Image (cartoon, helix red, strand yellow):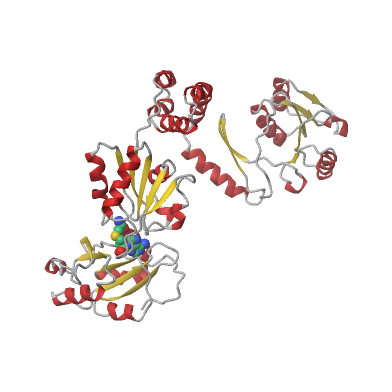
Amino acid sequence: MDYLPLFFDLRGKRCLIVGGGTIATRKARLLAKANAAIYVVAPYIQPELQTLVSQSGGECYVQCYEKGYLNNTVLVISATDNDRLNQQVSSDCHALNLPVNVVDCPQLCSVITPAIVDRNPLIIGISSGGEAPVLARRIRSHLEATIPGRYGKLAQLASRFRDKVKQTFADGELRRRFWESVLNGEIAEQVLAGNEAQAECAMVQRLAAEDCETGGEVYLVGAGPGDPDLLTFKALRLMQQAEVVLYDRLVSEPILEMVRRDADRIYVGKKRSEHAMPQEAINQTLLSYAQQGKRVLRLKGGDPFIFGRGGEEIDLLAEHNIPFQVVPGITAASGCAAYAGIPLTHRDYSQSVRFITGHLKDGQANLNWQEFVDARQTLVFYMGLVGLEEICAKLIEYGKDADTGAALVERGTLPTQVVHASTLEKLPGLIKGRTVHAPTLIIIGDVVKLHSKLAWFKQTDEIATP
Ligand code: SAH
């Protein structure tokens, strides 16, 4: 980090601007927002700048700059188009260890001004250390668009009640809960809708009732197929709220990184034939943490309701009246298809798509093969690697064209994704000759033939697709 971000209290303090033109005026507006006492020294000072100076309680010196103007100053901004003068101001300030900003000249600065998102008292400063200002501004516009304008009002409400909340909830964890329920709930919604008086009343009532919503809750969240960018906003919000997280093998490391730092993490496994925790124990663990008043995150690969046993996990919770939320995720079929350039449906090739479990019981996939032979549908087999040969053979046996496109997508959406594209007849042989890493998904249908044209996601692996 080349610069340490700090927030400077300038209220009533003497800040000197050297220069009296447009840029100096822009800087003065910023200082005025921070309630600084603005002083300006320049041979000519624009009228708007003069007004800002007098409103701030400062003074205009219609003079040439001299070192003496730096006395009793806490911050200096040099906004002139005279390089030598800027240099002079900078070296005078450096000699006095006085913070100085020379506009558009980072090498002469000891402090730089960030791009600002202002939701007073909530202030966000973004800086690229002068290296990529356009990028910093892009981030600012992004934040401007996503943080509601009335967030400042919310922060002001929080500030008004801060001491009272501290008195009511001496325990830090309860206090945190209280604030989270306020900021994520109805009270915040009221403020954002402009009903501050109502929000105040609700705050007073909740504090009187010492209501910090300590009931436990479970969030059953789909984490998508692996790429963290495929998480939903809601998933992310709940991931940062939960105190306990139960996750399995399919949840990628970068996604786990996004879970609240101090949350307890419990690995519940689920590798093929190696269950770190049996399903009943997972269900029971969710229940008992929630009964202790915890907010529990059950983080699952893909979508929790697609081959995820999500229904079973919330069944027990429902029986015990534990509140829960289910957050859908991008299922492996959607993720792998998109990242492999294989549209699951296509007007010319496929009018429907089926998600099928390829998990074998006693070495047999007891499926209704007859239903799968229609050429105008796409078949997606989850958990099908072990049964690949059997699946392809059965489909051909029941009448599916041996030349139908078939692909195995390994580690879909991850940087190590590999697509093995072939035909129903040849795919098993192709895979036999290659090392394949779980998880894998099988896509069967003529849409697979579009892969060679539509693939866009760069695979890091060297294997060329035939
Ligand atoms: N609920 C998950 C599926 C869980 S079953 C979902 O909606 O995606 C586990 C199977 O999902 C794996 O055996 C594999 O077939 C598939 N799978 C999950 N993530 C995958 C990925 N990134 N790439 C390929 N297949 C994946």
Q: At which x and y percent is residue 152? A: 52, 29
View quadrant of ligand 1: bottom left
Which of the pair 309/349 is nearer the observer? 309
Q: At which x and y percent is residue 45? A: 77, 29
Which of the pair 246/80 is nearer the observer? 246
Q: Say left or right for 206 vs 15.
A: left
Q: Quadrant of residue 455?
A: bottom left
The quarter of the rendered structure image containing the C terminus is bottom left
The residue depicted at 74 percent of the width and 26 percent of the height is 13
Q: Is residue 280 above or below residue 174?
A: below
The residue depicted at 37 percent of the width and 45 percent of the height is 297
Q: Is residue 415 above or below residue 30?
A: below
Q: At which x and y percent is residue 358? A: 23, 66
Q: Say left or right for 166 vs 382.
A: right
Q: Say left or right for 123 vs 27.
A: left
Q: Is residue 336 above or below residue 20?
A: below
Q: Quadrant of residue 383?
A: bottom left
Q: At which x and y percent is residue 77? A: 75, 36
Q: Say left or right for 101 vs 280.
A: right
